Image (cartoon, helix red, strand yellow):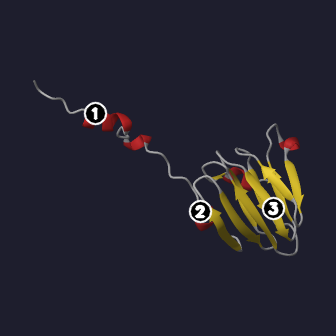
Amino acid sequence: MRSIDFSRATRLRDNPPMAESAAPRAANTRPWERDYTITQTVVIAETPELRVIDLTLAPGECVPWHLHPDNDDLFICLRGTFEIREVLGGGADSDRVTVMQPLDRHNVEKRVPHTAVNVSDAGCQFLIVQGPGRYDFKRLPKLDERPA
């Protein structure tokens, strides 16, 4: 009687080979390194499901329009004033602008297009708690053309 080796079949079942085109796109987890430049970005803590970053914007600087498919952004203003702009769907009349001042908090839910803009004459600093969920930065360049 001939024995059958199921180990290769089991490995293939549990880890099927991926076709070239089916390979997942790498998540954009460090957008400030390739998509935009601001005064300062410091990663304070990071796990695969949660991240805390400290951002500083000079007057006129912004984080470009983007969204996160799988995680919320909780903004906490540390110093200065800035705006969080969101597109909530349904046309320009459904846009929301939240003015942030020290110790203000605001949550942007996953899949909501948003930007952070320093419209003041001084620098601003804020924390963003990102998660829970896998982090990915999906840039939305068409929204960068929106009037301020």
Q: Is residue 148 visible?
A: no
Q: Which residue position is annotated with label 3?
A: 76
Name the amino acid type tagged 2: Arg
Helix, strand, or loop for circle 3?
strand
* Kind of residue sitting beneath label 3: Ile
Q: What is the spatial separation of the Cα atoms under label 2 and label 1, in whole angstroms?
A: 38 Å
Three-letter code, disc 1: Ala
Q: Nearer the viewer, mark 2 or mark 3?
A: 3
Between disc 2 and disc 1, whose residue precedes?
A: 1
Q: CA distance from mark 1 to mark 3?
A: 51 Å
Within-10-Å neighbours for mark 3: few <14, some 14–19, many 20+? many
Instruction: Provide the residue designation for mark 1.
Output: 9
Q: Give percent across and percent down for residue 11.
A: 32, 38
Describe residue 130's horizontal placement relative to residue 104 as left or right. left
Rendered position, 121 above or below 138: below
Q: Are marks 2 and 1 in contact (CB under 8 Å)?
A: no
Residue placed under numbered mark 2 in the picture? 30
Residue 147 figure quarter: bottom right
Residue at (64%, 64%) from the top-left corner?
Answer: 45
> Which mark's residue is nearer the viewer, 2 or 1?
1
Instruction: Name the image quarter holding residue 28.
Output: bottom right
Q: Of label 2 and label 3, which has the lower sequence position? A: 2
Q: Quadrant of the N terminus?
A: top left
Task: Tell me the CA gap for discs 2 and 3.
Answer: 20 Å
- Residue at 35% from the left image edge and 33% from the top image edge: 13
Q: Position of residue 63 (x, y in %)?
A: 72, 62
Quarter where residue 55 is shown: bottom right
Which x, y percent locates residue 27? 55, 53
Question: Measuring 80% from the left and 42% from the top, which residue is drawn there?
Answer: 88
**N-terminal of the two: label 1 or label 3?**
1
Marks 1 and 3: CB-CB under 8 Å? no
